[in-house]
Image (cartoon, rainbow, N blue to C red):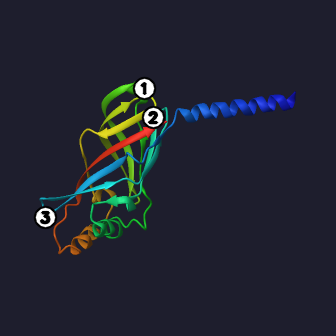
Amino acid sequence: MKKALSSLAMTLTLLSSASFASDNYTLDSNVSSVSFATIKKQYIVEPATINTLSGTLDSSGLFNVSIDLNGIDTGVEIRNTRLNEIFFESAKHSPVTVTGKVDWASLGEGSLKMNVPAEVTLFGNTKSIEFPVVILNAGDMVMVSSSAPVIIGAADFGIPSKNLTDLAATVGDIGISDRVPLTLNLMFRK
């Protein structure tokens, strides 16, 4: 009898864990991205996309997204390398993390425009940022897209101005803005 109760308890635990897990969402990195654009000479815009993302969203609205900067794609290989090695010093720093909680109760099914507060850790420094987004909750998937860009500054995260100066030196000391517009497109699936 004790063995049967033990087996029953274990089965119930597994079922409840499976039920909980089915309420969680995983970021689909094949269709998710973060995009930004560097600006040099005050008017030349060079877009970049990062597709190397992973993350989760649970049924209470807690989310955690990790962004591997080694996946920067500007369309120019040497520019990708320089951004990683000179500016972001990616080899020395962990991936960027974005954590927070969305008000899950206010979502319901369908779409909703809202500002989502998050803690962003980049270059070893954490900053609170509000992301203006449109969230589409379709039950088995949740899509999150920027409704407006967020302006991110290098100094906000403690990236030394020397890194930007050294990066500019590789392209003939052309002035490069230390602020970039950033947008995101994320797809979470059950």
Q: Nearer the viewer, mark 3 or mark 1?
A: 3
On screen, residue 100 above or below 108: below
Q: Quadrant of residue 139?
A: top left
Callouts 1 and 2 close, C-beta under 8 Å: yes
| Distance between the alpha carbons at the discs numbered 3 and 2 | 41 Å
Locate residue 61 relative to residue 165 in the image: left or right: right
Question: Which residue position is annotated with label 2?
Answer: 61
Query: Residue drawn at (42%, 26%), measured in percent from left and top?
Result: 105
Q: Specify the amino acid type for callout 2.
A: Gly
Query: Residue drawn at (34%, 64%), measured in percent from left and top?
Result: 88
Q: Specify the amino acid type for callout 1.
A: Ala
Q: Secondary structure at mark 1?
A: helix
Q: Quadrant of residue 89?
A: bottom left
Q: Specify the amino acid type for callout 3.
A: Lys
Report x, y in % for residue 124.
41, 59
| Distance between the alpha carbons at the discs numbered 3 and 1 | 46 Å
Locate residue 168 relative to residue 69 in the image: left or right: left
| Distance between the alpha carbons at the discs numbered 1 and 2 | 8 Å
Q: Quadrant of residue 21?
A: top right
Report x, y in % for residue 145.
31, 39
Question: Which residue position is annotated with label 1?
Answer: 105
Mark closest to the chain's N terminus, 3 or 1: 3
Could you classify mark 2 by the number of other residues whose Cα lies within 10 Å: few (under 14), some (14-19), or many (20 or more)? some
Mark closest to the chain's N terminus, 1 or 2: 2
On screen, residue 31 above or below 125: above
Report x, y in % for residue 127.
36, 50
Question: Which residue position is annotated with label 3?
Answer: 41
Q: Secondary structure at mark 3?
A: loop
Locate residue 2 relative to residue 159 in the image: left or right: right
